[in-house]
Structure formats: C-alpha cells, structure tokens
Image (cartoon, grey):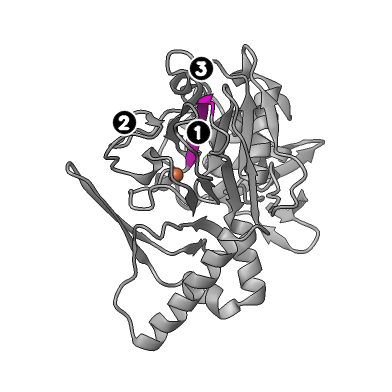
Amino acid sequence: MKIELNNKKVIFNNNQNKIEIHPIWLRERVRDEQFLDKNNDQRLFDPSSLNNVNIESAKINNDTLELTFNDGVTSKFEINKLTSEFIDSENLSNTVKQKFWDSSLKSNPMYEFKENLFDSKDMYDLLKSFYEYGFVIIKNVPTQNNYIVNFANSIGSIRPTNFGEFFNVRSVPNPNDLAYTSLALSPHTDNPYRKPVPCIQLLHCIKNEVSGGFSTLVDGFKVATHLKENNPEYFEILTKIKVKFKFTDKNVVLENRGELIELDGQSNLKQIRFNTRLDYVPVLEKNRLDLYYKARKKISELYNSERFRIDFKLMPGDIMMMDNHRLLHGRTKYNSNEGKRFLQGCYINHDSSEGKLRHLKRKFDF
Ligand SMILES: [Fe+2]
C-alpha cells in the first residue's frame, strides 16, 4: 500500500489497483494550525465550502507528501496516516481478527485484576481478547460497594436500563424476569426488546456457594456460520425476517424488532438475537412461516447443543464480560437451599469498549 504521484495527481496504490485521490479529500485533511484544533482533532473550517480545489504542486520526501493547493495552502501529510484511511476499520478488523469457537475451545480468555488496570497494556490485551472471542473473564475484582459500577465506568460508561444502573441477579420471590430465580436459563441474548439492544454485559460474581449454577456461553457467530454452511435456506430466512421482541412488567412495555441473524451491508455477521420467551414473528404467508419455524427450531437446537456450548463456574471476584450482540449466555439450575448465588450485572455499549481499545492501541501499538 503506498502513495504515488502522477504529475499533479496523488495516487493510492494497494498493489491491485490504483485510484486517484480527490483533491478535496486531501485538502480537508490539512492539519495546519489555522485549519485544525490540535487539542481535539476537530476542523476549524467547514470543508463543504471547498470547491474547485486543485493541486498546484506535489512532491514526496520519504514518509511525507507535500502539496500546494490552488487556494494558496501548502501542507505536509504523513503518508502512513493517509494510507491507514484506506483500511476499513469499522469493525476493528485491523486490530482484532474474530475467532469463532465451539465447545472445543481449550481455555477461556482470562485476565487478573490489578491496580491501574484500565490504562495498562493488560487492558489493551484484554479488550483485544474480548473482540476475538466475544468474552473475557477478569479474576479477583474487588466485590465490595458495587465495584462493578466502577469497573464498567472505567472502560466506558454504564448503559442504565429500567433494571437500574446495575442489577442484582439472585433468586427472589415473584420475579419480573426468570433471571431472578434458581431455574436453568437456556442460551439467550439479553434485552432484544430494547432500542438499542445493550451491547456488552458484565456479570460480577459476588457469592457462589451452590453446586449448580454454572455459567454457559455459546458463540452465536459460530452457530450462524455453521447454519449458513449446512442449511443455507434457514440462514437466509433468519437474516430476512424482523421479529418483534417484547418485555412487559407493571411499570413499562418495551418493544423492538430485529432479525435473529442480522447482517451488515457487506453481508458480514453483525448481531444475533435469541430469546424464545419474548419473540413474536409477524404474520406472513404460511409457507414462509413454515420455513421460519423450521429455521428457528434448527438454530435453537444448535444453540442448545453441547457441541457449541461451554460451561464453567464463576467464582467470587470473577467478572464475565460478554458481547451480547455475538454470544448467547445462560446458566444451569441450582438449589438455593445449598447457599447463596449472587451476581451483579450491568451493560456498556460498544462505543465505550471500542473507543478504549482504539485509545490503547494508539498508546501501545504504534
Ligand atoms: Fe441474560
């Protein structure tokens, strides 16, 4: 990948094809003092007012491109900064390559809590692991004074919901959600009825005195990939139909719609939703719904099969941080007469964790 000159044209060459870079594209990236506030990287002018921009002269010296534009502005550009913009970084694919996994996953990505974790190289590695696997476990996090709130706010900022800034997961009488019982929970994604759906869930184990109550995780992207390969017509319909999800209690009615497998504009996996206690497919032609119900049954079997599931016991101090847009989570049942099982949970959004990851990459990886 390099920048070349052809007379007064600036050419981006990625070894396969060459494209001319538009003069306005370059002119709006001029970083000189009068055009850009160095403290925040924000422009001090409106680039939409630029027109008829031309390059009067261009030269390359080592890693620097020097241009003079027809409005009299001369500026130097770092070539590697320009070329980095030609790599799509929307889903952090430059920093992290996702690794889809099933029950053969050898060991859980695990990190130890320490003082000054949040701005450390360990945090950079932790977040990279998180985006590789869709989850990480952090051991020995302080359990006093709802420390989960400090932890989450040190990565980004908590996303409050009608369950509060954080929620306590333990069995209670007359719960408004099955999470607050000792029943087994089959693999599901959280809160598909919210707009937007919370991105990341943190669960902090405060007490776990029971013999059951294992946490379970499934990589939804692995299962979706398996479905695409083996039952493409099922995959197809699950990526097309927007299903309504609904939550009701005495204070609120929440609703949102989305595909069980959502793809992005390039047909990459973007988000999975699965919560068969709360889903309502719209009325469609019978043969289309026939296919949908077969597809949902199939993906439910895959999500619930041992082939794709890992389970493990969270110990006091453990925080499990998981991507609610990629992974499904659940738990095995437990007997509340054996002792206490007490977890605290909260949500943060991807812009928190991605922003932190980009910041730490800037700090440790350049
Ligand atoms: Fe859940």
Q: Residue at x 75, y 40 (%)?
A: 107
List the residue tagged with mark 2: 164
- Which of the four quarters of the rendered structure image does ligand 1 lie in? top left
Q: Is residue 161 left or right of residue 83?
A: left
Q: Helix or strand or loop: what does disc 2 sit on?
A: loop
- Cβ atoms under marks 2 and 1 closer than 8 Å: no
Q: Which residue is mark 1?
A: 202
Q: Nearer the viewer, residue 225 or 334?
A: 334
* Residue displayed at 77% across by 40% down: 60
* Residue type pointed to by label 2: Gly
Magenta stretch mostly in which secondary structure? strand
View extreme (left): residue: 250
Q: CA distance from mark 2 to mark 1?
A: 14 Å
Q: Nearer the viewer, residue 212 or 315?
A: 212
Q: Which residues are magenta?
A: 200-209
Q: Quick check: can you spot residue 31?
A: no
Please check the rendered image and state whether residue 355 is part of the magenta-colored stretch, yes or no: no
The picture places residue 65, in percent across and down from the top left corner, at 72, 39
Q: Amino acid at mark 1?
A: Leu
**Displayed quadrant of residue 289:** bottom left
- Work out which quarter of the rendered image holds the C terminus and state it: top right
Residue 88, numbered label: none
Mark 2 → mark 3, Cα distance in angstroms: 19 Å
Position above or below: 49 against 66: below
What's the residue at 65%, 25% (across, down)? 123
Question: In this figure, which residue is indicated by the disc labeled 3?
Answer: 143
In the picture provided, is 56 more to the left or to the right than 273?
A: right
Which one is closest to the eye, mark 1 or mark 3?
A: 3
- The CA distance from mark 1 to mark 3 is 13 Å
Q: Is residue 213 above or below residue 150?
A: below
